[in-house]
Each structure stands twice: as C-alpha cells, then as structure tokens.
Image (cartoon, grey):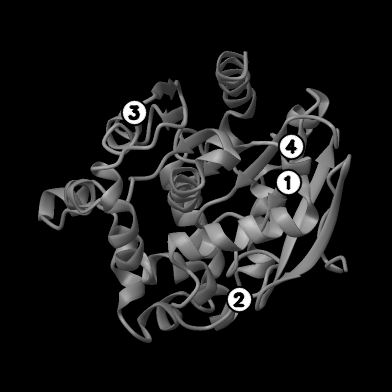
Amino acid sequence: MVPMDAPEITGFRSETAKVRDVRLHFWVGGDPGGTPVLLWHGFLGTAYSWYKVMPLLAEAGYSVLVPDMRGYGDSDKPAGVEGYDARALAQEFRALVQQLRFGGGRKLLLVAHDMGAPPALLWAAEHPEEVAGLVYMEVPTMLEEFLAKTIVYTPEAMAKGSMWWWILPLAPGVPERLIVGKEREFLTWFYDGATAERNSISEAALQETLRTFQGVEGVLGALGVYRAAFVTIAQTTPLTKHKLKTPVLAIGGEKALAAKVAEMVGAVAENVTAETIASCGHFIPEERPEEFFNLFQHFVSRILA
C-alpha cells in the first residue's frame, strides 16, 4: 500500500506495512545486496527529510530503508503516550526490518537525527549483534545530567532560546490549542532559528512536513516523543554504567549543538568519533547533505575495513 499523497524520490519506493498495532510508512531503495543503512528522522521531520541524502547513499551502493516513526509522516499517529518511548520505537523499527527481511540478516548501519537518535542508541546497546555502527546527530543522550544543562529556565537562557519545547508537550491540552491552526508558523519558527542559513529548508520540504503535521492528530503525534521523554530517560540512563561498545559517529552542527553531541554520547559509549560540520545548524541532512555523506563514508570505511 502506497500513500496517495507521498512525493516521489528517484530510485526509491514508497510503501507501508502493518507492524504490530500500527501501519508504518517507509521508503526503500538502493542496491538490495549492499550494506544496509536505516535512516531515522527526528522531531519536525519525516522520512522525507533525508531526501538529499538518500540518492547519495543509493549511488554509493548501499541498501537504504527510511521509515516514518509512529506519529509522523504517513505512519499511524496513535493517541496517548504509550509506544512513543525510545525502547518501543526501537522495537517497532526492528520489527519492520525483520518483517521486510531488510539487509538479509546482515548488521545494520543506524543513522539517526534528533529525537530519532535515542531509540537508535538503545537498539545498538540492547542488540549489538544487529548493529555495525551508529551515527548519532544533534540531540542530547536523554540523560538527566545533560538535559538539566540543556533545558535551563533562567531569563538569560530563555533569551538565548532555551529548549522550552521539551516541557510544552507535558501540559495537557496546551500544545494543540497553541499550535493547531498555526502549524506553518510553528515549523518556520523552528526552521529559521535552528538552521545556519535562512531558507535552508526548501519550500517543497516544508510543505511535505506540513502535509502530515496538521490538526490535533498530527501535532500530538509529533510531540509524542517528548511526552514519553521521562520513560526514555529511565531507559537510557543505565547506559552510563554499561557503555555501548558499537562504534559511534557523533555529529553536531557548528551553529547548533556542535561538540556537545560527542561529549554527551561519550557518557554512554566507549568508541566515539566526534565531528562538527562547519556553517551548519541543527538540520544536518537538509543543510549539509554532502558534508554529512563524506563523514559517513569515512566512518564506514574505517569500521567495516
């Protein structure tokens, strides 16, 4: 089943599959016999957010799977908090991979951005036999210690743009009253403030996100990962005592989290390669796809040598 309104990406098929209790949308393409790569989007993105990176990976011979998380894009958007924590999201994508037999049983490369990264981290930690490497981009590691430094509510911090959106979703009934009907304004505020250059997110990409980030269902679906954040924190914190051994490439944008990403990942992983992309904000896959791809290629050539 293919979503009727899904755009086209050359060389990729848009499909859906029923996985447990939800229907997930995904793109798949590249060389089926190539090294399998799963691309994981974040908050205010969808699988389509990787549209600049997907052809680069396909042309390089990778097999590529790009799903929409529950709550996003053309995947189902169940109400409530259940199913939006990192472990549940990881298990859902694991089930999709197994159902599709994606990669043919070979180890995956997990590439995750923003709020897609904590679930990918848990997958790599809890099923290391399935993951060859992890790329972790532009989000805290969901540890209370680091979140306390990131989500600071002083007048000075708020003036600099403290991450209030971590707290807003926890207030029942408030997000839908403030955001529904103003979805475009909400998105453009984030995109303009979190990119290094205005208009880094194309109008076509903005419209594709807006297509499914609409109404109460779309807004609350996207905010589900934040509503389940305290569950995710409880799931990831034990990694500080039992660190991940899988190789990790930690990438930050110079104008966003930058080197803080590697610092945070270093608290939960032993083998971390740190990189910062110059003149780049938060939305790395869309702002600097070629630079990301070059870093990824170098990382893969080293860990799979």
Q: Nearer the viewer, mark 1 or mark 3?
A: 3
Q: Quadrant of residue 243?
A: top left
Dot 4, how many residues are within 10 Å of its Cα: few (below 14), some (14-19), or many (20+)? many
Q: Position of residue 229 (x, y in %)?
A: 34, 64
Secondary element type, mark 4: helix
Secondary element type, mark 3: loop
Q: CA distance from mark 1 to mark 3?
A: 27 Å
Q: CA distance from mark 4 to mark 1?
A: 9 Å
Q: Which mark is residue 54?
A: 4
Residue denoted by label 2 = 77
Q: Which mark is residue 65?
A: 1
Viewer can see residue 199 = no
Dot 2, how many residues are within 10 Å of its Cα: few (below 14), some (14-19), or many (20+)? many
Q: Left or right of 215: which side holds 160?
A: left
User: Which three-letter amino acid code belongs to the residue tagged 2?
Assistant: Lys
Mark 4 and mark 1 lie on one chain; the one further toward the N terminus is 4
Residue denoted by label 3 = 270
Mark 2 and mark 4 lie on one chain; the one further toward the N terminus is 4
Q: CA distance from mark 2 to mark 4?
A: 24 Å
Q: Nearer the viewer, mark 3 or mark 2?
A: 3
Taking the spot 53% from the left edge, 62% from the top edge, the residue there is 89
Q: Position of residue 211 (x, y in %)?
A: 69, 67
31 or 172: which is nearer to us?
Answer: 31
Taking the spot 81% from the left edge, 25% from the top edge, the residue there is 61
The N terminus: image quadrant:
bottom right
User: Which three-letter amino acid code belongs to the residue tagged 3?
Assistant: Glu
Secondary element type, mark 1: strand
Taking the spot 76% from the left edge, 41% from the top edge, the residue there is 103
Dot 1, how many residues are within 10 Å of its Cα: few (below 14), some (14-19), or many (20+)? many
User: Which three-letter amino acid code belongs to the residue tagged 1?
Assistant: Leu
Mark 3 and mark 2 lie on one chain; the one further toward the N terminus is 2
